[in-house]
Image (cartoon, coloured by chain):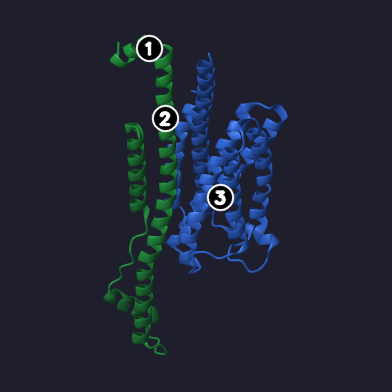
Chain colours: A green, B blue
Amino acid sequence: MSKFNLITIVVAFLTFTTVFNITRQPDIIVPGERIETTVSDILGNDTQYDETEIQQIVTQAIQILNDGQSRRLKYLISAYFVVWLILMLYIFHLSQKQEQLQTELDLLNNQLQPDKAKEDRKGI
Amino acid sequence: MPVATALYVVTPIALFAALYSVFGYAEYEGTMLEVQKIFYFHVSSAFTAFTAFAVTCICSIAYLVKRCVKYDLVAAKSAELGLVFCTIVLTTGPIWARSSWNTWWNWEPRLTSTLILCLTYVGYFILRTSVSTEQKERFASVFGIVAFLNVPIVYYSVKIWQTGGLHPPTTTRSHLAESMKHAWLVSWLALTLIYASLLKLNIGFSWAQYRLNKLQARTYSN
């Protein structure tokens, strides 16, 4: 693979990971006290609800969302990695084809003009 | 600026814009959250594959009418790229399905017809390598036209076989939020540009190879 292709692949991959890291949704991190005060604020003086029970439910819901996020991100990253990998493998296949073509051209050039080919190799 | 150079300049910009619009601009879907973002490249790849197969079909017809080798070459290279994008669809799909439907694969109409489409074009290349040179182009062109009939079947499979398949109906895209619709259109454009760039590059190599082969044949026969 030529140096140019390798650089293109590395730059493209780095661009993708940078964009992904900059823009991905941050983890849901809510401290316990914050849940308590928010639930109290919403309920106010309404006594028909059990405040502790609601706090537990909200904490549990946040925990589920939190745990689910890493699992969802794992699938998302895998899918985009696959897209990248397939396209890169195809570009690699094209670069191999180009190299093969170049070899065949050199071979033909050698046979048609042996002296000129020697000079080309010496860089004259 | 020549078309090829413009294409090679615009494609990375479009790809960057697509990645930004998918991860930075489009809103999160309420049920699937982050995983739904697979949609943008999964569906766009499917549409790009359909475009590639349509180009193969058109060029195959053009070859049968005009008998110009260049049309056959474009048809073959476009089918090759269609297969690449079809592979992307068939690999990202199960990853999304595992997360959303809790299964890697399901023999529902859309999935099965897409797999058949992919295998049909694998058959197209098997045909190209197994037939003698004189007849190869003609047979491949006929195959390229017939194989394209699979594309509308894949697209309308959800409508044709309403057997409670997991894929949503084709009208789902019109119900998307505005930001999601924009991100999808940008992604589709980016993948179409990648397809066009790679096709241009591949045709260049293959045309050079074809001319080289002719030259070699002439040189060795003298």
In terms of depth relative to the viewer, which is nearer, A100 or B109? A100
Both marks 1 and 2 on one chain? yes
Pointer 1 indicates a residue of which chain? A
Marks 2 and 3: CB-CB under 8 Å? no
Crowd class of label 3 (few under 14; some 14 to 19; many from 20; radius 10 Å): many
Please name the residue shown 35% across and 45% down the image: A13
In terms of depth relative to the viewer, which is nearer, B111 or B172? B111
Crowd class of label 2 (few under 14; some 14 to 19; many from 20; radius 10 Å): few
Q: Give the x, y percent position of residue B106.
A: 55, 65
In terms of depth relative to the viewer, which is nearer, A73 or B210? B210
| Camera-side mark, 2 or 3 | 2
Is the residue A32 above or below the residue B206 in the image? Answer: below
Q: Give the x, y percent position of residue B74.
A: 58, 33
Question: Which three-letter amino acid code belongs to the residue tagged 2?
Answer: Gln
In the picture provided, is A5 more to the left or to the right than B201?
Answer: left
Instruction: Give the distance between the C-alpha atoms of the residues marked 1 and 2, in whole angstroms.
Output: 20 Å
Is the residue A7 above or below the residue A29 in the image? Answer: above
Residue placed under numbered mark 2 in the picture: A100
Please name the residue shown 51% across and 38% down the image: B193
Residue placed under numbered mark 3 in the picture: B46
Crowd class of label 1 (few under 14; some 14 to 19; many from 20; radius 10 Å): few
Q: Is residue A14 visible?
A: yes
Question: Which three-letter amino acid code belongs to the residue tagged 3?
Answer: Ala
Q: Give the x, y percent position of residue B21.
A: 45, 49
Please name the residue shown 72% across and 30% down the image: B65
Helix, strand or loop at label 2? It is helix
Question: Which three-letter amino acid code belongs to the residue tagged 1?
Answer: Pro
Pointer 3 indicates a residue of which chain? B
Residue lying furthest right: B65
